[in-house]
Amino acid sequence: MDPIEKAIRNAFEKGDARDRAFREKVYRSAFAALDKTLKNNPQVTVEKAIARRKALQTKITQIEAEFVAPPPPVAPSLDMSPSLDGVRPTQNTRPSPRAPQGGPRVEPGFDGIDNPSPVAERSGGFAVDPDMRREPRRRGWGGLLFFLLFLAILAGAGYWAYQNGIIRQLADQYLGSSATTTTTPETTDGQPIEPAPAQPSSSAPPALGEQSDESRNWINVFDPTDPATARATGGAAARGANDPAGPYLEARSNGADGTVVFDVGQGILDQLKGRSATFDIVARGAGGSGTQVSVDCDFGPLGDCGRKRYAITPDRADYLFEVTFPNETPRAGGTITINTDVSGGTGAVDIFEIRVAPAE
């Protein structure tokens, strides 16, 4: 199955896919997320963008057509029972001349045989009722009518998707998730769908995982050389370590309730209020193994970041998400909470850095 089709169908399972409003929400969330991704990926060429858009236009049209029930086929009303009422032998209506009294005998004429009627000639000596010849033609028109109705339904579904911006936005989503080759995509419950904004009034969704821009004004949130800003809860474990890749904090949840909490200082939140900001978690799977982690945030009156999931690979990479903060004064600091194994196992991650960059 195509990756974007699988992602959309998995997202549908988290709600009522028969609800048109729910499907539109899934599409809008995915599309808006890609708009941000494209801004940070200028290396995507126009040709690649056009090709991805066309491919996704076809895919969303196929998916959406499944939710538009076609009308029942209109079967032509035909009486298929055999009947011989319309078949009758051809008769020669010309009377045979009679021999006059006392005259020579006159033989019957063969004009009717030498010059048969066109209808009798085509039917082998029988005149066929014209209505019977037209029945197969009516059956053909019925099948054509059903085919045209089916095409009209598909065209209507495609037009609806185009008018509502679904095709364009899904094309953007599909393009962005495949154009970044050096990053790991953000997922929500295992799929790149349903990013959650910090506030209900905010229209800017979290960005998909992408390569961070080192030229931005990054503010350090967590440094493994200062482990005092991190703490393990619920049976989780955290310890500092170092290797050629640099210092890091090895975090292990050891169960569904185990989490590692990272403090976000009040001074940092004060710099982010009223602005959009991109958070970057620099991490890798511990021990050369991958795992799936969940990330939650609590920024007090500034809201949260929604629940996010990432598939962490054994290689060091950037895992990004975006939050739009209201213009409120923070009363205290906030937190970022990570569960290193959403399956409830003992998967661990090495966290090299957590940082945030306000929008320029």
Image (tube, helix red, strand yellow):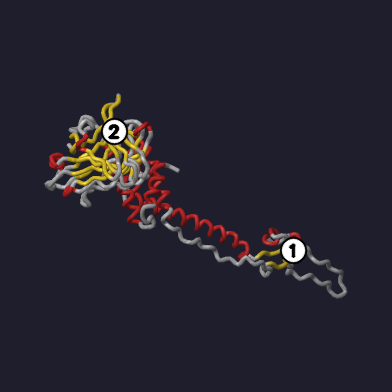
Q: Position of residue 298 (x, y in %)?
A: 21, 46
Numbered disc 2: secondary structure: loop
Numbered disc 1: secondary structure: helix
Q: Name the amino acid, label 2.
A: Gln
Residue drawn 18% across and 38% down?
358
Label 1 belongs to which residue? 112
Which quadrant of the figure has residue 59? top left
Q: Position of residue 274 (x, y in %)?
A: 15, 45
Marks 1,2: beta carbons within 8 A: no
Label 2 crowd bin: few (<14), some (14–19), many (20+), radius 10 Å:
some
Residue drawn 60% across and 62% down?
135
Locate the N terminus by quadrant. Answer: top left
Q: CA distance from mark 1 to mark 2?
A: 94 Å
Q: Position of residue 320 (x, y in %)?
A: 27, 38
Q: Nearer the viewer, residue 36 or 118?
A: 36
Which quadrant of the figure has residue 226? top left
Q: Nearer the viewer, residue 310 or 183?
A: 310
Is residue 49 visible from the viewing direction of this image? no
Q: Nearer the viewer, residue 59 or 208?
A: 208
Q: Name the amino acid, label 1.
A: Gly
Going by the picture, which residue comes out furthest to the front?
Answer: 235
Q: Nearer the viewer, mark 1 or mark 2?
A: 2
Residue drawn 83% across and 66% down?
107
Is residue 114 visible from the viewing direction of this image? yes
Instruction: Work out whether mark 1 precedes mark 2 in sequence or the reverse, and give the earlier one.
Output: 1
Q: Is residue 351 above or below residue 83?
A: above
Q: Is residue 102 left or right of residue 297?
A: right
Q: Position of residue 159 (x, y in %)?
A: 37, 51
Q: Is residue 139 above or below residue 163?
A: below
Label 2 belongs to which residue? 211
